[in-house]
Image (tube, helix red, strand yellow):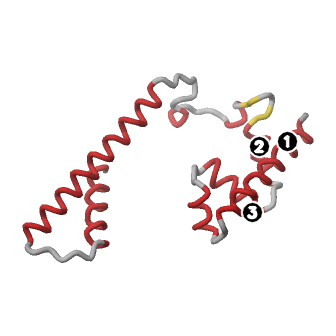
Amino acid sequence: MDAEEIMHDTIIKYLETKRDFESKENRNAWMRRVCINLSIDRLRKKQTMSGFLEGYDHPHNNIEEQDVDDGDFNYNGVTVDMVKKAMSYLPDGYRLILSLHLFEGMDYEEIAQITSLKEASIRSQYIRGKAKLLKDLNEKYK
């Protein structure tokens, strides 16, 4: 699948560039070089990620392979179910931004593009939403 993605990325890069090549050989050489560079980048990224996770020894590393109920996980007495329930009471804007940032791993810039809001607004709503979530959790479960 990685090879297919790299080929697709190469074709997209070719279509995005408005270059005129002198010949088919020049175009093919350019596409080969782009494909090689994208492949090297992908390998470096994989090596970096595997090196990062190599030293991480956590009992829930392979959570997809385990049949575990979310309610079993807790931190200082707060379970995942409690967090989910508290998030359901948050206003839509806070809930959306917290979900995109915390669960989907998107940065503020990506969220700003999706929501058509300014990055500064996203950051402040994230901070307010997180504070409200913590406050709600403390009030309801402590």
In percent of the image, x 62 and y 48: which residue is there?
A: 103
Say which residue label 3 marks: 93
Circle nearer the viewer, 3 or 2:
3
Q: Secondary structure at mark 2?
A: helix
* Image mark for residue 83: 2
Say which residue label 1 marks: 137
Specify the amino acid type for callout 1.
Leu
Q: Is residue 10 left or right of residue 86?
A: left
Q: CA–CA distance between discs 2 and 1?
A: 7 Å
Q: Residues within 10 Å of mark 3 (few under 14, many from 20)?
A: some
Specify the amino acid type for callout 2.
Val
* Image mark for residue 91: none
81 up-or-down from 108: above or below: above
Viewer-closest of 99 and 19:
19
Q: CA–CA distance between discs 3 and 2?
A: 17 Å
Viewer-closest of 139 and 109:
109
Task: Indicate which disc, 3 or 2, sits on the residue closer to the N terminus.
Answer: 2
Residue 89: x and y in percent read 83, 55
Viewer-closest of 139 and 118:
118
Q: Secondary structure at mark 3?
A: helix
Task: Indicate which disc, 2 or 1, sits on the residue closer to the N terminus.
Answer: 2
Specify the amino acid type for callout 3.
Gly
Q: Secondary structure at mark 1?
A: helix
- Image quadrant in which you'd find residue 26: bottom left
Residue 98: x and y in percent read 70, 53
Q: Is residue 29 left or right of residue 93?
A: left
Residue 129: x and y in percent read 78, 53
Q: Are marks 2 and 1 in contact (CB under 8 Å)?
A: yes
Question: If the image is split into quadrants, where does the C terminus sit?
Answer: top right
- Image quadrant in which you'd find residue 48: top left
In percent of the image, x 75 and y 63: which residue is there?
A: 93
Task: Indicate which disc, 3 or 1, sits on the residue closer to the N terminus.
Answer: 3
